[in-house]
Amino acid sequence: MTPVGTGRGQLSLSLIEAFVGATLVVAVVTGFAIGGPDFGGTREAQLDRYAGDALALLSADDSGPASTADTRSTLVALVASEDSFERAREPARRRLATVLPANLLFRVETPHGSIGYPNPPGRTVGEARRVTIDGTITVRVWSQ
Amino acid sequence: MTTDRDRRRGGGPGNGCRGNRGRRRAQSNLAALAVALVVVTTVTVGGVVVAEEALSSVDRDAAARRAAGAVADRLVAPASPTTHRANVLDTAAITDEDPDSPAALTSAADRPVRVRLGNRTLVDRGSPSGPTVRRAVLVGERRPERTRVALGGNRTVVVNRTTRIDLAFRLRPGTVVRTVRADGRPVLHAPSGLDGNATLEPGGTGPTRLRFVGNGTNGTVVVTTYPLDTEPGVLAVTVGRLRRTDGGDPTDDGDTAAEGGDDADDSGGREDDRDGDRSVDERGSDGSVEGSRGPAGDPDADETAWPGTGSRTAGEASLVGSNVQSGREGAA
């Protein structure tokens, strides 16, 4: 039985150690190459931009049907009162769905209720907020 | 069976050289150690190089990303010559933009830049490979939209947000429109009655409700507005790395940044000029209409009322004077 033991011992231990070490280093480097961590918070910055754009487009929205005789922008209508929120809710949702890129989900929070999808736990979320005289409106945006 | 297994275990012929092997193993250990050192060193050095590259590219990207963000901000800014208002791009302006030196691109001076709108490339200077900043925008143009308001009806019309409302009074004798109210506040008033054409510039951010107050029901007012016809799109700005000219010192970054700043200042001036020209032009054209005895005769009042929004809290008289540029052309 001894010859078997010596025969197996041929592969040097230091070589094995070297390969183990190399594997570790390569693993760490792969991490860098793939760019696991979001170094500059770039994803979040991009999502913040989208959220800000959504807010800007809501506040500039004049696509509201003139026949409703509501002479306010969608953003103001959303915050103004319970009634106007209910009226503006569906147009606003449609507006955001067409304006934001298709892979993004959104949620709008106003003092009178929310529009959109429920907040995702543990996701990178972009956020934009505007304070109006009637309350604060918050837009959150995240990618699917 | 048993012999087979023995052979497989290397029992048979190898037994004789056991001593030899033991000595050679020590030798191969030394070689293996050398190989191991080489492997570890190579991998470590390679790893450090890759990591360094990754980190420094993040650094460079951050600068390029800031530049891209600034360019995108300028392109969608409300006062930019490329937009109707915040985030709403003007189709005409962006296609007419001189691709070599758009003012908005000065934030990325010395860098390759590409601006794309959906699948369309608007500007491609130096085919950059770098970070991309995206903005959700609307793209559109203003098209005239005509509504006829019969004074026999409810005398009210709600028009969508517009920069300008043209009114044409088509009234039969005996019918008089004395006041036009926008969202309740008077914007046009003539005690003897309005006729001919008039132009309003509503300052609000939403639709406007117009009401025509007067006597008689025989006539119509033609209301022309210029609402935006828009469709959504994504504006993508890609900015590449700083171009190195004739082997310039790579530590020159600070200087180039400073130059970039100067450029930005210059362009700011240019943009201001452009805006100035534009507003002067419009004012000029309004002025010519106004030359005929309009209620808003005072050019100074006109100038102060240019933004058209500040007058909400002012008194009626000043409203009539300031918020409206109106002219009554001698009716044909």
Image: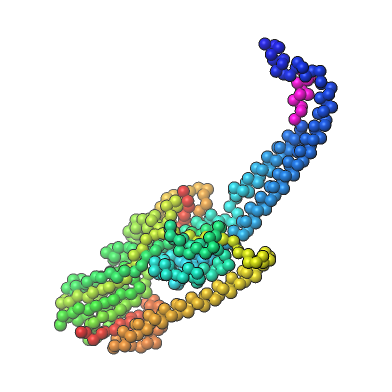
Taking the spot 67% from the left edge, 11% from the top edge, the residue there is: B1
Taking the spot 63% from the left edge, 58% from the top edge, the residue there is: B59
Q: Is residue B102 magenta?
A: no
Viewer can see residue B239: no
Q: Is residue B232 left or right of residue B184?
A: right
Taking the spot 70% from the left edge, 49% from the top edge, the residue there is: B48
The boundaries of the magenta stretch are A1-11
Q: Quadrant of residue B222?
A: bottom left
The foreground one among B251 and A136 is B251
Is residue B172 shown above or below B22?
below
Type of secondary structure dominating the magenta stretch: helix
Residue A105's x, y, as percent? Answer: 44, 52
Q: Is residue B30 left or right of residue B202?
A: right
Q: In this view, does B319 lie to the left or right of B215?
A: right
Q: Total label count?
A: 0
Q: Quadrant of residue B204?
A: bottom left
Viewer can see residue B284: yes
The foreground one among B146 and A48 is B146
Is residue A52 shown above or below B151?
above
Taking the spot 30% from the left edge, 75% from the top edge, the residue there is: B165
- Quadrant for the C terminus of chain B, please: bottom left
Residue B223's x, y, as percent? Answer: 26, 73
Q: Which colour scheme is used?
A: rainbow
Q: Quadrant of residue B151?
A: bottom left
Is residue B217 shown above or below B317?
above
Residue A135's x, y, as percent? Answer: 43, 63
Residue B269's x, y, as percent? Answer: 52, 78
The foreground one among A100 and B233 is B233
